[in-house]
Image: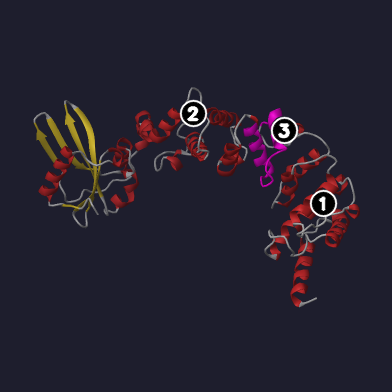
Amino acid sequence: MNSRKQQMKQYVDEMLVCHQPCERHRRAYWNLIREVRAKSEILSVGFDPAIRKPGHLRVYVRALAYVAKYRTKWMRQPEAWRPPKAQAEPTSNRVTFRSLMKHLFERYPVPGFMAFAWMRPQAKRWVHELYIHMAAGRGVRQFKDKPRIALTPAAAKFFLKAPDHLAPVEAMRWAQIRGFGGRKDLANELVRNTILKEPTGDERFWETVIRFLIREKLSYAPQASTLVDFLDEQKFQPAEKVWGRGGGPLPLQPEFSMKGRTLRSLQRHMYNWRQELLLKRPSLAKRNFHWDAIAVQPMVHQEGDVKWLIFELLNDRALMLEGAAMDHCVADYVEQCAERKSSIWSLRIHAKGCPKRMVTIEVDPARNAIVQANAKSNEDPSPAAREILQRWATREGLVMSLDE
């Protein structure tokens, strides 16, 4: 045996000692280790492409330690185990481990992901208990200690078909979605990329969301993740985190419901929620910061019954209201404005007694230049608004640098 192999064996031996269970399980553990070493490559760096480094063996060592703790649930002893024979290529360690689990525990078939869950770091006890429960022939719906994800009879059948890469709790959500009639791509998307991979604090609400997404038959599954993230932010996350400074610790829309909503109405609300909430709760635009005006002067220009105004926005509340009304991100300029690296102005028109925001303007105080001028939704200003802007720039000696 060369020095490399000796080092590897010593490393594994130390790992096995480190992870051995308490004394009452120790005899079963070392007996299991002896059989696994004699009959497989699970505890050696062999063919398995998933095992790139010796440290990855810790996954199997830890799993075998868990298995030994349930020795009283073994249906058969390790000595009688016959691992699958290698065909053209060596058998992977995962396949071999799956074979061992079937031999030791399974009176009835159990999904592969439940067996592989023993290999997950910090596996929770309920996962092992559920595996034992199912191996004895009992259904997942009869397991009392499972997470708070409701499973219909149809979902329980899909649970048995969940992909092997899922954790058990993810498989429950996947099965729930499929049991409601959801497509595979939707189930995969919600489990992979949203908070729904775990049990939530309001399962009843999220069940209505899942049914809504299924009913609307989204053609593009990632769209579902965007909607779920939005609903979570509005209904459950602190407003200070979602809205920004001044939002407070409570959610923005804690009473939000899916009742009566369509995909189109929900998408419209998702795009316009800041403007809609400001109309209902103007206190959200609370002023926290104020800064001094720059040397440039405001302007009032009268043309008959039409009055044009250009004035500087001097606090974060004004920026927030401007951004909400004009559908752009000027509210994010608070820090630049407070440090006087940027100056934001609003061009408005008063016609027939109705004020209307026309253009949001950014002035660079250091260069004395107008660097941005955007109408609503970052559109270009109208010719009339641009003429007023040019008149103001000329009067104040501002350079027009809008094309930079």
The secondary structure that most of the magenta stretch takes on is helix
Element carrying mark 1: helix
Q: Position of residue 99 (x, y in %)?
A: 81, 50
Q: Which residue is mark 2?
A: 256
Q: Is residue 110 above or below residue 15?
A: above
Pointer 3: residues within 10 angstroms few (<14), some, or many (20+)?
some
Which quarter shows the N terminus?
A: bottom right
Observer-side mark, 2 or 1, equals: 1
Could you give the CA–CA distance between mark 3 and mark 2, rounded to whole angstroms? 32 Å
Could you give the CA–CA distance between mark 2 and mark 1, rounded to whole angstroms? 49 Å
N-terminal of the pair, mark 3 or mark 2, is 3
Disc 3 + disc 2, Cβ < 8 Å: no
- Identity, as a three-letter code, of the amino acid under mark 3: Lys
Q: Position of residue 381 (x, y in %)?
A: 22, 40
Judged left or right of residue 326, residue 44 is: right
Q: Which residue appears at 57% of the width and 41% of the height? A: 189
Figure label count: 3
Q: Nearer the viewer, residue 292 or 3?
A: 3
User: Does the magenta portion include 67?
Assistant: no
Q: Which residue is mark 3?
A: 157
- Identity, as a three-letter code, of the amino acid under mark 1: Leu
Q: Nearer the viewer, residue 290 or 2?
A: 2
Q: Position of residue 142 (x, y in %)?
A: 76, 32
Pointer 1: residues within 10 angstroms few (<14), some, or many (20+)?
some
Q: Which residue is mark 1?
A: 100
N-terminal of the pair, mark 2 or mark 1, is 1
> What residue range appears in magenta?
150-178
Q: Which residue appears at 70% of the width and 36% of the height? A: 159
The structure's colour scheme is secondary structure
Judged left or right of residue 216, residue 158 is: right
